[in-house]
Image (cartoon, rainbow, N blue to C red):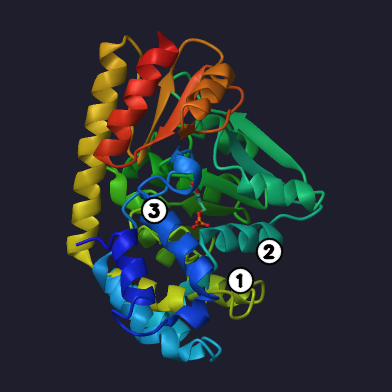
């Protein structure tokens, strides 16, 4: 079961749990605004948000109950809830607690890796396009970034990335890759890791598995076993995607215990709120909720893909909760036109300027979005 935003507001604000009284919400006016905002299926100003690869259905019921139960601890620093989440993640993956590193979203894990491993002598290797955060952090720090274009099938060019890895501090390997939605199978990942190990033993490989739960390609496996065996491989995961908690901010890494110990030094202490910790702890092993969200994504994605294919566009493969569609024209005016009609789609991802990244919303949202796209693309 997924908690609707309407349910959440009524339970919190109107006495379902009696936790948030009107004065706590800042008075009736504020509460009314909050209720109107949250009960809308579309977010503020009626916009359907298909631009950030979020889960439109939000967290599961267990997360909601855990947040309510934890609210009374909101005055405490999150030491015990952090320990509880580490234990739950370790149990879920069958690893030791020393193999788990928490982050304020997986973004914090990505930042920690850049800070720890990219320096004046050791560059970052990343793809173009891929999730930009590591490259942006490295550039902000004044570090060298080598960007390897994706191949003609929009897959990471692992051969070329391997060529550039010599002497690198960090390789960012996003699998599945955002924004191209492509994925590499276990054999290709192992071969890549072995090659980098051989050619550049000090280089660390960060495997970003933010979209892990959405993968359907049978050749794919998580790189967690590689990370446990090799101190230079790190896997990052997030609660922002299939778990529906992008606004709560919780993520983690699984790595060798020596690596976790080293990275701990770069953490923002107490960087995850007790509410996010409670929700994540309750959700990490919630198979039923994960299966429901996978099914919803599969169905709405199939509907959206069918629309594009019928209209004559290649929607590519997608092992994620978004599609990267070649619309055969500059995507920017199309994006603007969609926005004017209440549909937010992904930003431009140069050099793929004719590709539109569209996140998968609810079936109802995708029906509305495809109606708009039908007009805009006509
Ligand atoms: C590939 C990838 N990694 C990491 C993130 C960061 O997510 P968060 O910080 O919410 O865990 C995103 C967000 O969209 C992403 O697409």
Question: Is there a contact, CB below 8 Å, between mark 1 and mark 2?
Answer: yes
Q: Is residue 314 left or right of residue 80?
A: left
- Percent from the top left, x then y, of residue 1? 19, 62
- Judge by depth and name the residue closer to the eye, 142 or 269: 269
User: How many other residues sit within 10 Å of disc 3, few (<14), some (14-19) or many (≥20)?
Assistant: many
Query: Disc 3 or 1, which lies upstream in sequence?
Result: 3
Q: Are marks 3 and 1 in contact (CB under 8 Å)?
A: no
x and y percent of residue 222 in the render?
Answer: 34, 53
Q: Report the residue at 52% width, 26% height from top.
A: 340
Determine which of the numbered discs, if any, sits on residue 241 in the image.
3
- Where does label 2 land, which residue? 116
Callout in the foreground (2, 3): 3
N-term mark: 2 or 3: 2
Cα distance in 3D space between marks 1 and 2: 7 Å
* For residue 176, side relative to residue 139 (left or right): left
Front of the two marks 3 and 1: 3
Badge 3 residue CB within 8 Å of ligand 1:
yes
What SS does tag 1 mark?
helix
Q: Secondary structure at mark 3?
A: loop
Q: Which residue is mark 1?
A: 263
Q: Residue at x 58, y 21 (%)?
A: 332
Q: Give the answer, above or below, for where 207 lies relative to 289.
A: above
Residue 90 visible within the image: no
User: What percent of the width, then of the height, locates residue 345?
Assistant: 48, 32
Nearest to N terminus: mark 1 or mark 2:
2
Tally of numbered discs: 3
- 238 horizontally vs 305: left or right: right
Residue 86 seen in the current view = yes
Q: Position of residue 110 (x, y in %)?
A: 58, 57
C-alpha gap between disc 3 and disc 1: 24 Å
Real-space Cα separation, disc 2 to disc 3, in angstroms: 26 Å
Residue depicted at 45% across the width and 55% down the height: 37
């Amino acid at each position: 079961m997924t908690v609707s935003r309407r349910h959440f507001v009524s339970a919190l604000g109107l006495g379902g749990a009696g936790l948030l009284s009107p004065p706590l919400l800042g008075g009736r006016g504020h509460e009314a605004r909050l209720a109107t905002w949250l009960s809308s299926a579309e977010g503020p100003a009626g916009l359907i948000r298909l631009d950030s690869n979020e889960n439109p259905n939000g967290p599961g019921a267990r997360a909601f109950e855990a947040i309510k139960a934890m609210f009374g601890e909101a005055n405490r620093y999150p030491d015990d809830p952090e320990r509880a989440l580490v234990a739950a993640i370790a149990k879920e993956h069958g690893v030791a607690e020393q193999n788990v590193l928490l982050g304020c979203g997986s973004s914090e894990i990505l930042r920690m890796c850049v800070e720890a491993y990219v320096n004046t002598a050791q560059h970052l290797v990343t793809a173009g396009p891929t999730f930009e955060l590591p490259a942006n952090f490295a550039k902000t720090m004044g570090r060298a970034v080598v960007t390897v274009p994706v191949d003609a099938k929009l897959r990471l060019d692992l051969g070329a990335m391997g060529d550039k890895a010599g002497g690198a501090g960090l390789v960012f390997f996003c699998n599945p890759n955002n924004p191209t939605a492509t994925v590499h199978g276990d054999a290709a990942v192992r071969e890549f890791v072995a090659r980098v190990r051989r050619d550049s033993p000090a280089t660390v490989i960060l495997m970003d598995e933010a979209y892990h739960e959405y993968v359907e390609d049978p050749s794919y496996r998580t790189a967690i076993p590689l990370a446990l065996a090799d101190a230079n491989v790190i896997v990052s995961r997030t609660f922002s995607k299939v778990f529906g908690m992008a606004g709560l901010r919780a993520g983690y890494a699984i790595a060798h215990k020596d690596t976790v110990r080293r990275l701990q030094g770069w953490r923002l202490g107490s960087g995850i709120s007790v509410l996010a910790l409670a929700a994540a702890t309750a959700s990490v092993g919630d198979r039923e909720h994960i299966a429901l969200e996978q099914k919803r994504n599969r169905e709405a994605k199939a509907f959206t893909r069918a629309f594009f294919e019928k209209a004559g566009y290649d929607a590519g493969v997608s092992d994620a909760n978004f599609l990267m569609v070649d619309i055969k024209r500059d995507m920017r005016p199309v994006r603007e036109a969609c926005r004017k009609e209440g549909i937010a789609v992904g930003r431009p991802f140069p050099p793929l300027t004719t590709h539109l990244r569209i996140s998968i919303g609810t079936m109802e949202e995708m029906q509305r979005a495809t109606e708009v796209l039908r007009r805009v693309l006509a």
